[in-house]
Amino acid sequence: MSRITECFNNLKSQGRKALIPYVTAGDPEPKVTLPLMHALVESGADIIELGIPFSDPMADGPVIQLACERALLHGTRLVDVLDMVAEFRKTNQTTPVVLMGYLNPIEVMGYSAFADKAKAVGLDGVLTVDLPPEEAGEFNQLMKASDIDVIYLLAPTTEEARIKQICAAGSGYVYYVSVKGVTGSASLNVAEVADKLEIIRRHTDMPVGVGFGIRDDASARAISEVADGVIVGSVLVNKIAELAGNQEQIPGAVAAITASMRQAMDK
Amino acid sequence: MPTKEDLAIAKQMPDAGGHFGQFGGRYVSETLMAALQQLEQTYEKLWRDPQFQAEFDHDLAHYVGRPSPLYHAERLSRELGGAQIYLKREDLNHTGAHKVNNTIGQALLAKFTGKPRVSAETGAGQHGVATATVAARLGLECTVYMGEEDIRRQALNVYRMKLLGAEVVSVTSGTRTLKDAMNEAMRDWVTNVDNTFYIIGTAAGPHPYPKLVRDFQSIIGREARQQCLAQTGKLPDALVACVGGGSNAIGLFHPFIEDADVRMIGVEAGGYGIETGQHAAPLSSHCRPGVLHGNRTCLMSDEGGQVIGTHSVSAGLDYPGVGPEHSYLQEIGRAEYTAINDDEALHAFRHLTLTEGIMPALESSHAVAEAMKMAPTMGKDQIILVNLSGRGDKDIHTVAEIDGINF
Ligand SMILES: Cc1ncc(COP(=O)(O)O)c(C=O)c1O
């Protein structure tokens, strides 16, 4: 059983939902990421989504675009991100780590080299925003062979037949993008999300995480009532941006946000 | 050399998934998948629909002013002392470039699908102007994304778009040029997918865009082929076209794919020179395949897969990728790709203006410069057919600046 599946099973038996923070690796500097990951876990994060910085983050709003720019300024490459996972694994063997990003850095490294490295460093899952299952045949095979879960997105615009097809291709969990828009965009409609999750659950037993538009304790709690996982990104990245000049404060300040969400979700 | 069978296959590309061999495809976030599938269905139906075809042809004739002439540049050819240079005069189209062929087609699709709003990205501003133009005519709301750097160098076109009622959004992320404008246009589309038709300006992007843009632009090659036969009794020896994303080039090339004796030469922006790394020439600098803006193609990216900043004096060629069909045509050996540097393009701009009284766009000047290099190495009875993709009015400001003149 993959670390991700095990994580969701444990939570389920405790009647809790997964808190899944997203941060961009290397933002604002590479040395911040590792302590930040550990702080997130201590604050109650169950899975960490680590963003691979990319020069052209087409599905992201300004907040994560700027995070990518900051990380790239210090030359954070995909190999460096994988190294961060390896470092994290030295002291944490239980919290799943998922890399999230765009295909080109992986494409340039080569799928098979990436799969080998990902396995070697103890990565658990990968989510490539711009790689739908139609184009992912070879990629999927190589990841599966390395026991890496491939996580796919579902959107408000995804029709039922396609939901079925995507869920069949993925493993670990599926990521429901709660709004039509880029990351960090306007607030979500919980009732609409709940309706869509009901349809999604007709086609999969996999846990469903919901992301985009979760910005505070109230929205985290509301989503935790209908979804299996709550994915939160832009609010955390915003805090990182605010503290770019006081980097030693970043882990504590970001973890304070997730700790508070954790409490709200567990109430 | 590709065989006859290879060329027959090439002519039928892309496959059902939008692939040109290993290139092309549909690499987008999930939110856009439904819209792209719907666009594909709409397009496949309408492209075969006589009523749609009739409307498209009518607009090209009476609004754009087609067919555009094929002009024998006799003085230039005589002076170069070799091959005869013929110019396909896309510069004479309404709005001054080939871009309008495509926007007429896509606006018709928008009309048939009932979307009240169109959006576009633009580099030189020609596609933005062509989009704003068709939007004005059809009464559609129009937003155009343009890099801050391009807004500066193409100020005239920015004002033209505004006069046409379009909103021009300045893009300040990344390199502030065409690539970033395209990112922003895709973000807009993800957000407004229900009411917006995204009019892509070149033969790139996710499937079905490379195919439909090619089909709309292929009027260039179909006309040129007939005109060349009618005027000279034979096919040209070589086709030459500039390549940014590759829409004017593929529009010229496609109808000639199975004419194996006709060379096809795509001219990329060499910028300060390929050897400096400051260019926009993914094919002629032999970049590896990568994925950007929804398709796999030859892409300028570094060891870590980050897209590299480009440079060209011409905003319309300043793009790190290229339409996937060009990557494919290079790989199978059907088309050749080369680069022309800024200074060579500027020289060609001035030279064509002085010898023929035709002022080419800086983009098109790259193609003219390549033809000027080739002609002396060829026989007087040979023919080079150059796609003069646009006129140079929009670039007078840039050239004047280089001459130290301020208006
Ligand atoms: C006159 C002209 N030619 C060529 C291009 C390059 O585009 P493409 O390669 O799609 O023809 C542009 C783009 O702005 C243009 O304005």
Image (cartoon, rainbow, N blue to C red):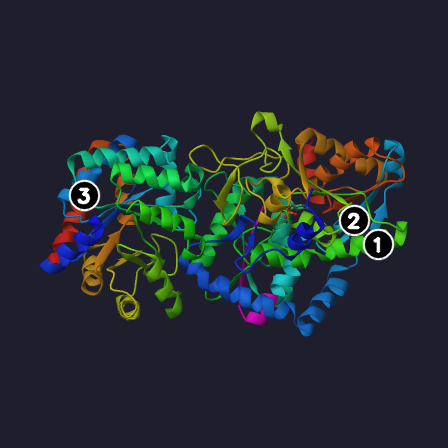
Asked if one can make out residue B68 in the rendered structure from this viewpoint, the answer is: no
Q: Chain of mark 3?
A: A
> In the displayed structure, does residue B167 sit left or right of residue B270?
left
Please tell me in which quadrant of the rendered image residue B400 appears: top right
Counting from the top left corner in percent of width and height, residue B165 is at 59, 59
Q: Which residue is mark 2?
A: B88
Asked if one can make out residue B8 in the rendered structure from this viewpoint, the answer is: yes
For mark 3, give the secondary structure: helix
Counting from the top left corner in percent of width and height, residue B176 is at 51, 40
Pointers 2 and 1 in contact (C-beta within 8 Å): yes
Residue shown at 20% from the left, 52% from the top: A1
Counting from the top left corner in percent of width and height, residue B91 is at 75, 49
Q: Chain of mark 1?
A: B
Which amino acid, mark 2?
Answer: Lys
- The quadrant of the rendering that contains the C terminus of chain B is top right
Is the CB of mark 1 within 8 Å of ligand 1? no
* Mark identifier at residue A40: 3
Counting from the top left corner in percent of width and height, residue B117 is at 53, 64
Which amino acid, mark 3?
Answer: Leu
**Closer to us: mark 1 or mark 3?**
1
Magenta span: B109-123
- The answer to whether marks 2 and 1 sit on the same chain is yes
Q: Which residue is mark 1?
A: B227
Q: In whole angstroms, how far apart are the C-alphas of marks 2 and 1?
A: 9 Å
